[in-house]
């Protein structure tokens, strides 16, 4: 008779480690533990790392406001359950960790460095090296998409249009993906994961977003660019 094994997991604050600052408060880092066939793996929460970044906090009434640990745990549990359901009945801890690394990734966060490189070169070519460096360094503390929106108000129209139009050819599709994500998510849980992107309903909603906001752009080209990034992420993970 074939044996069946139960997959169990938990998310927890790892009090065996030193406390770290999480948006102004000290806390133990969030970890994930998964057990299967009497074997266990333990690893640090991807979402804890992601939402610990300074860009995910705003100041209101003299206080810092950002994601809560409860919100992050909830996001972890959705992902973990998704992977378990996807891999049963051929579940393995090694495959789980590969899937976790892949499906957890926030596409906007992954594509942001490439978009920053594009902006750096763009403003260098325009004879604005100080601005290029300021954007490169300052993006660590601010959401880059919001910076671009401020540029829309500060720059003359031809310069701004050139920056955005060229980005569709020389940069990852960070801007349309972030714009779409911002319309479909609520602060502070602003992310667009690989797990979410691979849902056909998400892609259909993205196509509608592009039709309403960038009707002149080819949605299929963006899909193709994202697929190239997904292949790269998967290859690096393996």
Image: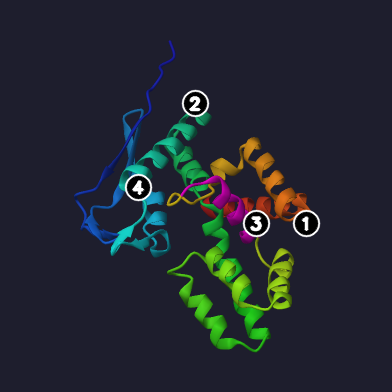
Pointer 2 with pointer 4, Cβ within 8 A: no
Lateral position of residue 82 relative to residue 223, left or right: left
Give how far apart the Cα atoms at labels 4 and 1 are: 40 Å
Picture coordinates of residue 103 (x, y %)? 52, 44
At x 77%, y 56%, the residue is: 217
Give the residue number, with chain letter if any, for mark 4.
43
Question: Which numbered disc flags the more N-terminal residue, 4 or 1?
Answer: 4
Q: Which residues are magenta?
A: 173-186
Instruction: Answer whether residue 138 is magenta in the image.
Output: no
Picture coordinates of residue 52 (x, y %)? 36, 58
Q: Secondary structure at mark 2?
A: loop
Q: Quadrant of the N terminus?
A: top left
Give the residue number, with chain letter if any, for mark 3.
176
12 is higher (above) or lower (below) than 107: above
- Out of 229 and 214, give the one closest to the viewer: 214
Residue 217 bears which disc, if any? Answer: 1
Question: Which numbered disc flags the more N-terminal residue, 2 or 4?
Answer: 4
User: Residue 93 sits in which quadrant?
Assistant: top left
Give how far apart the Cα atoms at labels 1 and 3 are: 10 Å
Give the residue number, with chain letter if any, for mark 2.
88
């Amino acid at each position: 008779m074939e044996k069946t094994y139960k997959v169990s997991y938990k998310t927890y604050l790892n009090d065996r480690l030193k406390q770290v600052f999480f948006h102004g408060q000290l806390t133990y880092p969030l970890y994930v533990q998964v057990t299967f066939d009497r074997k266990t793996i333990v690893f640090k929460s991807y979402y804890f790392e992601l939402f610990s970044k300074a860009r995910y906090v705003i100041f209101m009434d003299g206080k810092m406001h950002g994601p809560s640990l409860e919100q992050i745990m909830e996001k972890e549990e959705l992902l973990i359950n998704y992977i378990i359901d996807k891999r049963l009945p051929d579940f393995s801890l090694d495959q789980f960790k590969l899937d976790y690394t892949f499906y957890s990734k926030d596409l906007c966060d992954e594509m942001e460095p490439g978009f920053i490189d594009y902006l750096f070169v763009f403003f260098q070519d325009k004879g604005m090296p100080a601005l290029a460096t300021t954007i490169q360094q300052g993006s660590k503390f601010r959401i880059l998409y919001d910076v671009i929106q401020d540029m829309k108000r500060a720059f003359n129209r031809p310069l701004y249009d050139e920056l955005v139009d060229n980005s569709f050819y020389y940069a990852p599709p960070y801007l349309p993906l972030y714009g779409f994500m911002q319309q479909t998510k609520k602060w502070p849980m602003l992310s667009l994961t690989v797990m979410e992107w691979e849902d056909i309903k998400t892609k259909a909603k993205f196509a509608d977003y592009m039709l309403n906001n960038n009707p002149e752009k080819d949605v299929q080209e963006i899909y193709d660019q994202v697929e190239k990034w997904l292949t790269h992420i998967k290859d690096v993970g393996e």
